[in-house]
Amino acid sequence: MLTELEVTAPYVLAIAGDNGPKKNLATLVRAMAALPADLKAVTLVNVGRPRYDVGKLEALIASSSMRDRVRFLGRVSDETLRRLYAGARVTAYPSFYEGFGFPIVESMALGTPVVTSDVSSMPEVAGDAALLVDPHDVDGLASALASVLTDDALHASLREKGLERVKRFNWERCARETRDYLAECCDDG
């Protein structure tokens, strides 16, 4: 897989940018630790630059069964990120708040199912192409991850829905809709 990064399948990918509190990594670590015994070989791979509460997160990992199952990669190249998305069994994005949520679309574009929060912009971005969970619910997140990790039919369905959904998001459409909105606003004034 990505042996140069010491990443082997199966793994859950988390993209957390600066790993700020809103990214909800502590709940994700707890959910990973709560996975059923037959999924204890699944690792959590985090991409992002740790800046906030790193000590608390490291203490949580050290005190759980996750000590040997978490890989913090920091920032990676675009090509490595693409490979990480493509190799993941699922992308977990349990953020408390996002303005958009690019990792949802990026993951779907590479055919990787997504489990994300049912708050903020995430439901609108994900639609029915992802599993949506309460970002405070450790057991709900663990259950959703376990479902995607073990249910091949669900995995395939989310993959296909994601590949279809991602077609709605492109920069040309974004520019056109922004232009149209600005023109409408200017016509009203």
Image: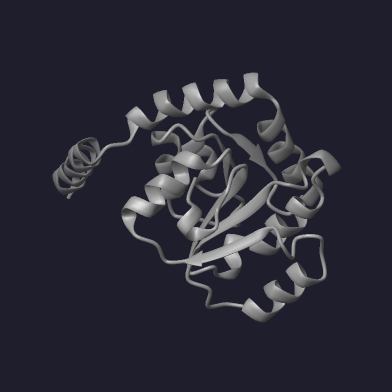
Provide residue 69's location: percent of width, then percent of height: 69, 58
Residue furthest to the bottom = 55
* Placement of 149 over or under 155, stated as above or below: below
Provide residue 97's location: percent of width, then percent of height: 55, 57
Residue furthest to the right = 37
Asked whether residue 117 is in view, the answer is no
Q: How many numbered badges does the structure rendering display?
A: 0
Asked whether residue 19 is in view, the answer is yes
Choose top left, top right, bottom left or bottom right for residue 113.
top right
Residue at point 52% right, 44% down?
122
Residue at point 42% right, 40% down?
105
Residue at point 19% right, 43% down?
175
Q: Left or right? Give the position of 122 relative to 57.
A: left
* Placement of 81 over or under 161, stated as above or below: below
Choose top left, top right, bottom left or bottom right for residue 136.
bottom right
Q: Left or right? Give the position of 98 relative to 148.
A: left
